[in-house]
Image: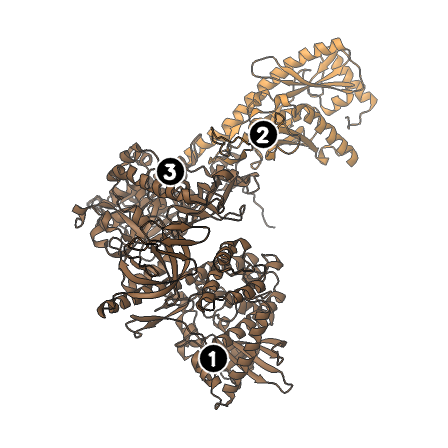
Chain colours: A brown, B orange
């Protein structure tokens, strides 16, 4: 008989063994939670060769600690307090910080409790190869466990636990290495408590526990000058707080988080993302659901230390205080030129700067029109900071002149590359070497007393304007993961490597299971020049019954990328391949992307095919989906394919196939347009690179489109739509779809008004079809580019398309506005987009090829992945655009230099005015696809209601009136900002009025 | 509510021996003596306060006696909707284990539970003894103190036992620390010259709407004891048999007693007990003059009983906190 023993704990032990706490649920209930704790005596210390503890792992702390610190010649370990990880994570992560770290469970849990992102970084740090870290579960070891005393705060209790852990380690080391008779006493390493909490340090000293502040500790380390820069501003006790304290807070304090939630719940406060204004650093806006228009924030006090991207809480003023957005360009660099970084001196300048800012604000205020007033408010709290490392330049003028070469610590301004961010004040010892470099800076805090946020230096990226630094800074700025693929990921590739081929046909082989043999078809691919990742190929033939069979064949990525392995997770987190002008950051390892999955010509490849039977009018009679094996007969470039179609002499099967595709595509397109699809425009330019090695841009030109571009596009759209229907039918809850919400009509108000007043044109935005029709009517016989310009401006009024999980939104919002399709997904580029990989898996399951992986049955999982992919997608687009901008800048530089040589003087281009300000114009140069600002220093007459600006001519004559949509000629110059090394495109008006000197 | 069926001669025997000169009782107690009371608090870790009480446990038989389990659960309640009081409230319910009344039909058990619940709820939910710290956010949210009692077994004097268990559970209850937060919209700036603003009507009852919520303080302990827990009432049941009365009747004695007088006293510290409730059970008769006398006697008994309970409760508090901590310290 089995003997049952009941091991029951005494209830008296509850105080030790149970931790009780209350939790408030989202619905406002309070529940009591009890956690059990079992104490044991065999939690190991993690020090190599300890005779008491039996270790099973081999990643241990060295027996004698680290001998590098000058205060601890006998070797030491550091035991950091929670505040070290909360404030100095960059220091701890630095590869120069090599001391062995003992991480207490108490610390780990406290970090998790305080900040999840920091906790994730801490976990990554523990697993880093070049760090020696040991997690000690002190709460579970009977000697080091602590019980809360009566009236003790959790914080005090944790501090006590950390001190106790430190004391235990020190005694443990001395107990396990006793002096052996006849031998000299062993040298014992010290365990040092690292904390910036003064009270904790004092208590530790009283108890005889060695402890140091982070700054003191780092000062004693070998390479301290680099490490000291990494210290976050938070530990700067040297900061001259007297000066700051004397002048009173510049900003109102934030409300407590509880008050904020209460206010939001009652609908009196509003939560949203803070967006800084590109043109005016003293203005920002927050989109909140309660108002159709964004809530405007005017002035520093009202923006109250919010940084672009933060989730903030705003309070909206009563309606009579509402304002209209500014119509003036206010440049931070100009207004704040004289500002000084050193705190003490700043005080003197302070009033002056504030007065200047006030002036800037006031002059605007008078001009604000009542008609355009929108909700106005102020930031009263921050829900979540979205601070990350920012790419910056050091502002050379903020260096004190006597210090330009000294290596003493000084305070400087770092100007972020992005115009949306404020300058960051930081302290560094390396200022002279950092001038002219791109550096990475994180914001640590933003005090009520400090006009600017304070941050610290993370690392240098390299010389500004150098390609490598620019490229890396671009990737960092847009948060693109660009590390090479790790070993675990590469291990997921087929072991044959690039020797992999489709195995010979057999019914039994796993590769051929349920696959159709389509090798005999005349399949070809049509892509841009030099395309390496070919993910689609097409074919078409006439059927005996007069209908046409058309097929789209997509690289079968899901055959190689299996769900839930390291390669899959990496691809999911990268989300998309990022294309820069001179570099491609792959989502999948190159072996797959450019070889095994790429549908190269003349080799057999696995594919996922969508095959339609189309009527001669291009209506779908029938569609089927199948996994297949294909052999592409040729890889065309767009222009090459176009030539084949146009050349009547070519009558081979392949050419006929393309011709057939082309005719069908035209019909498909006509059908789509009739259904109300939009023909949108975005400025696309092409950068000519000198050669593949030097990658110096020679010139820029607008991309030319040929018929074959739209041939491929039409069939891809058709495939995407067919697949979307299929997977939505099969998995109504979790299908991966893509949608484009119709834009709210208010977005178009301004454009409609401009069009009406300036050109007498009207824009009907009631539906996508109506919009398409009215866009077609926006013509200027004298100016063919006008239509494109209106299209570009209309595109900017729209929302962006997004991936979504079909179960998480209501069915009537599935539609794709731009394509006028009720349902849509992305299926055709699985090599470079992760959403397509998911769609492939779902389609494969829908045709019963493989069962669907469990994760794709979970709505929450799909939502989470797609949320990440959406973000990456957005970032990738912005990174690509920024890369083009950079190269346009370089190309312009070349042009300007050439123009100077050939005494042509300056580079001029035609441009269109797209926005008027009180003191400037925003112009769009369509030839270069760039936008620029033309600023005037002289008085101008501005008519905001009519969108015109009258500029006096240089001799004080009548001058010229310029309105939105007017064609002007601008001269373009690239000027390097002397202080920030930021290459800036500078434009000036040449015609109708020469604005040089205005 | 006599479930013990007793024959006439048994009743007569018990009555006669109680009324005899030396007042004999079946277990040898004197008339004003209680059986052994054992009390333990903190028995339900997930409740906000709990207690288990036993009267007359017979160690030799490893059981018996009247046993009550009491537990307090605090729930957050919106008080803006509905006719709730401003400062939180108390509800009380009693359920009887069928094992305690094996002879009762299920309908009878329900009736019994209902009777108990009504009596306790009437007295305990009275605003005069509602603890003062049950409010969370004034006029918005408050704690609802739900006191649940389970009668595990009944061998007489169940009312006294229930009140004692309730008192112990209330004593053990800790209210989580909360901090109310509120957000008030900015008042209109003074001195604004809004001439054509509508005149405020004197009948305007719209209030300044303040957004309010609360948060839990970051504290690991269970909270603060209820304010006014000392005044929580206890009950003394006087079993009346012609001119004499006796305390803590066993079930046989209850069956033989024609009339029982329940007296509920609330003793605010040091002052004389205040009568909080009173009920007569049974078919006998008693006149007013006699009741007055009985109330005075009851006060005396209540004070004594209370002193004993308070002593034990303080003891329990020490046991659950300090002693455990000392024990933990000595183990290491």
**Any mark on residue A525, and which?**
1
Picture mark count? 3
**Any mark on residue A251, and which?**
3
**Any mark on residue A109, and which?**
none
Disc 2/disc 3 C-alpha distance (Å): 33 Å
Q: Residue furthest top?
A: B289
Q: Are marks 2 and 3 on the same chain?
A: no
In the rendered image, residue A283, in percent from the top left (x then y), is placed at 40, 46
Looking at the rendered structure, the secondary structure element under dot 3 is loop
Sequence-first disc among 3 and 1? 3
Relative depth, front residue between B122 and A137: B122
Neighbours of disc 2 within 10 Å: few (<14), some (14-19), many (20+): some
Q: Is residue A336 above or below residue B112?
A: below
Q: Residue furthest right?
A: B8
Q: Are marks 2 and 1 on the same chain?
A: no
Chain letter of disc 2? B
Q: Where does label 2 land, which residue?
A: B139
Quadrant containing the C terminus of chain A in the rendered view? bottom left
The answer to the question of whether label 2 and label 3 lie on touching residues, with beta carbons closer than 8 A, is: no
Neighbours of disc 3 within 10 Å: few (<14), some (14-19), many (20+): some
In the rendered image, residue B39, in percent from the top left (x then y), is placed at 59, 27
Q: Is residue A544 above or below residue B16?
A: below
């Amino acid at each position: 008989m089995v003997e049952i023993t009941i091991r029951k704990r005494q209830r008296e032990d509850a105080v030790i063994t149970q931790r009780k706490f209350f939790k408030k649920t989202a619905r406002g209930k309070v529940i009591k939670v009890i956690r059990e704790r079992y104490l044991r005596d065999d939690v190991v210390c993690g020090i190599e060769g300890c005779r008491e503890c039996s270790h099973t792992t081999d990643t241990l702390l060295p027996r004698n600690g680290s001998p590098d610190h000058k205060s601890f010649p006998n070797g030491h370990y550091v035991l950091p307090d929670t505040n070290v990880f909360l404030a100095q994570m960059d220091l701890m992560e630095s590869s120069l910080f090599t001391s062995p770290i003992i991480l207490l469970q108490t610390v780990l849990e406290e970090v998790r409790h305080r900040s999840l992102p920091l906790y994730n970084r801490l976990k990554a740090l523990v697993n880093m190869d070049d760090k020696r870290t040991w997690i000690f579960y002190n709460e579970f070891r009977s000697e080091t466990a602590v019980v809360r005393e009566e009236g003790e705060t959790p914080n005090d209790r944790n501090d006590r636990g950390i001190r106790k852990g430190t004391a235990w380690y020190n005694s443990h080391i001395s107990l396990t290495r006793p002096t052996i008779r006849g031998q000299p006493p062993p040298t014992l390493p010290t365990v040092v408590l690292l904390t910036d909490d003064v009270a904790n340090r004092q208590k530790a000293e009283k108890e005889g526990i060695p402890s140091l502040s982070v700054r003191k500790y780092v000062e004693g380390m070998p390479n301290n000058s680099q490490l000291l820069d990494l210290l976050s501003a938070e530990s700067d006790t040297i900061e001259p707080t007297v000066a700051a304290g004397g002048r009173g807070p510049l900003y109102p304090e934030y409300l407590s988080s509880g008050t904020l939630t209460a206010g939001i719940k009652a609908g009196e406060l509003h939560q949203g993302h803070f967006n800084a204004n590109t043109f005016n650093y003293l203005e920002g806006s927050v989109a909140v659901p309660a108002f159709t228009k964004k809530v405007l924030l005017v002035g520093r006090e009202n923006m109250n230390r919010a940084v672009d991207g933060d989730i903030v809480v705003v309070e909206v003023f009563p309606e009579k205080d509402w304002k209209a957005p500014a119509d003036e360009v206010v440049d931070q660099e100009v207004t704040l030129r004289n500002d000084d970084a050193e705190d003490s001196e700043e005080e003197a300048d302070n009033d002056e700067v504030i007065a200047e800012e006030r002036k800037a604000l006031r002059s605007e205020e008078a001009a604000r029109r009542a008609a355009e007033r929108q909700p106005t408010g102020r930031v009263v709290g921050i829900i979540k900071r979205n601070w990350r490392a920012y790419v910056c330049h050091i502002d050379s003028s903020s260096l004190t002149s006597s210090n330009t070469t000294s290596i003493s610590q000084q305070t400087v301004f770092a100007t972020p590359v992005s115009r949306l961010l404020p300058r960051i004040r930081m302290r560094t010892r390396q200022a002279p070497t950092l001038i002219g470099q791109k550096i990475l800076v994180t914001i640590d805090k933003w005090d009520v007393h400090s006009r600017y946020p304070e941050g610290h230096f993370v690392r240098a990226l390299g010389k500004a304007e150098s390609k490598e630094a620019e490229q890396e800074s671009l990737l960092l700025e847009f948060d693109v993961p660009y590390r090479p693929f790790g070993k675990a990921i590469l291990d997921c590739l087929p072991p044959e490597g690039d020797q992999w081929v489709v195995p010979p046909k057999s019914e039994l082989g796993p590769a051929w299971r349920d696959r159709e043999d389509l090798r005999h078809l005349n399949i070809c691919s049509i892509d841009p020049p030099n395309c390496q990742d070919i993910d689609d190929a097409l074919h078409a033939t006439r059927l005996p019954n007069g209908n046409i069979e058309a097929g789209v064949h997509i690289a079968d990525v899901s055959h190689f990328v299996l769900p839930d392995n390291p390669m899959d997770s990496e691809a999911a987190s990268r989300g998309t391949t990022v294309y820069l002008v001179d570099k491609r950051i792959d989502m999948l390892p190159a072996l797959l992307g450019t070889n095994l999955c790429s549908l190269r010509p003349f080799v057999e490849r696995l594919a996922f095919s969508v095959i339609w039977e189309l009527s001669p009018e291009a209506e779908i009679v029938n569609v089927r989906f199948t996994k297949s094996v294909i052999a592409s007969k040729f890889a065309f470039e767009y222009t090459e394919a176009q030539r084949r179609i146009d050349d009547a002499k070519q009558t081979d099967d392949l050419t006929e196939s393309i011709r057939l595709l082309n005719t069908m595509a035209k019909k498909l397109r006509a059908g789509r347009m009739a259904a109300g699809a939009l023909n949108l425009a975005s400025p696309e330019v092409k950068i000519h690179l000198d050669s593949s090695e030097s990658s110096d841009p020679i010139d820029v030109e607008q991309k030319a489109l040929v018929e074959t571009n739209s041939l491929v596009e039409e069939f891809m759209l058709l495939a995407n739509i067919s697949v979307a229907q299929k997977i939505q039918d099969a998995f109504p809850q979790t299908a991966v779809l893509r949608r484009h919400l119709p834009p709210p009509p208010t977005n178009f108000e301004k454009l409609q008004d401009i069009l009406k007043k300036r050109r007498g044109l009207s824009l009907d935005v009631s539906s996508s079809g109506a919009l398409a029709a009215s866009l077609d009517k926006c013509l200027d016989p004298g100016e063919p580019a006008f239509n494109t310009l209106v299209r570009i401006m209309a595109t900017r009024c729209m929302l962006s398309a997004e991936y979504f999980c079909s179960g998480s939104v209501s069915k009537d919002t599935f539609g794709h506005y731009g394509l006028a399709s009720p349902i849509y997904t992305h299926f055709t580029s699985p090599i470079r987009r992760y959403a397509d990989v998911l769609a492939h898996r779902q389609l494969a399951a829908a045709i019963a090829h493989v069962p669907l992986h469990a994760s794709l049955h979970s709505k929450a999982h799909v939502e989470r992945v797609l949320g990440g992919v959406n973000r990456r997608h957005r970032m990738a687009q912005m990174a690509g655009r920024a890369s083009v901008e950079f190269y346009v800048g370089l190309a312009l530089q070349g042009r300007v230099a050439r123009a100077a040589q050939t005494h042509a003087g300056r580079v001029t281009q035609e441009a269109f005015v797209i926005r008027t300000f009180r003191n400037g114009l925003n112009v769009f140069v369509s030839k270069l696809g760039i936008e620029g600002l033309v600023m005037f220093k002289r008085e101008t007459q501005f008519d905001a209601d009519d969108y015109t600006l009258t500029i006096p001519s240089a001799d004080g004559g009548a001058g010229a009136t310029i309105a939105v949509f007017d064609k002007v000629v601008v001269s373009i110059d690239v000027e390097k900002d002397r202080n920030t090394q930021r290459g800036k495109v500078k434009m000036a008006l040449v015609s109708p009025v020469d604005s040089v000197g205005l | 509510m006599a479930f013990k069926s007793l024959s006439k001669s048994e009743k007569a025997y018990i009555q006669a021996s109680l009324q005899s000169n030396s007042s004999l009782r079946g277990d040898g107690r004197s008339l004003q003596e209680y059986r052994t009371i054992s009390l333990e608090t903190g028995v339900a870790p997930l409740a906000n306060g709990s207690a288990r009480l036993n009267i007359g446990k017979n160690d030799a038989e490893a059981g018996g006696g009247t046993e009550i389990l009491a537990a307090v659960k605090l729930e957050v309640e919106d008080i803006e909707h509905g006719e709730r009081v401003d400062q939180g409230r108390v509800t009380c319910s009693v359920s009887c284990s069928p094992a305690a009344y094996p002879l009762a039909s299920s309908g009878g058990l329900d009736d019994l539970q209902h009777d108990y619940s009504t009596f306790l709820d009437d007295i305990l939910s009275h605003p005069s003894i509602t603890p003062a710290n049950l409010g969370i956010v004034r006029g918005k949210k408050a704690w609802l103190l739900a006191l649940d009692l389970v009668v595990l077994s009944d061998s007489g004097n169940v009312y006294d036992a229930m009140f004692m268990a309730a008192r112990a559970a209330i004593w053990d209850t800790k209210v989580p620390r909360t901090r109310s937060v509120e957000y008030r919209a900015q008042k209109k700036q003074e001195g604004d010259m809004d001439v054509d603003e509508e005149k405020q009507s004197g009948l305007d009852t719209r209030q300044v709407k303040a957004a309010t919520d609360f948060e839990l303080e970051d504290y690991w302990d269970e909270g603060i004891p209820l304010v006014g827990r000392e005044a929580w009432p206890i009950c003394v049941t006087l079993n009346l048999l012609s001119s004499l009365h006796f305390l803590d009747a066993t079930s046989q004695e209850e069956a033989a007693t024609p009339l029982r007088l329940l007296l509920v006293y609330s003793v605010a510290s040091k002052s004389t007990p205040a009568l909080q409730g009173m009920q007569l059970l049974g078919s006998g008769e008693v006149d007013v003059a006699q009741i007055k006398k009985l109330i005075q006697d009851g006060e005396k008994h209540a004070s004594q009983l209370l002193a004993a309970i308070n002593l034990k409760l303080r003891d329990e508090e020490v046991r659950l906190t300090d002693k455990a901590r000392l024990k933990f310290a000595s183990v290491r």
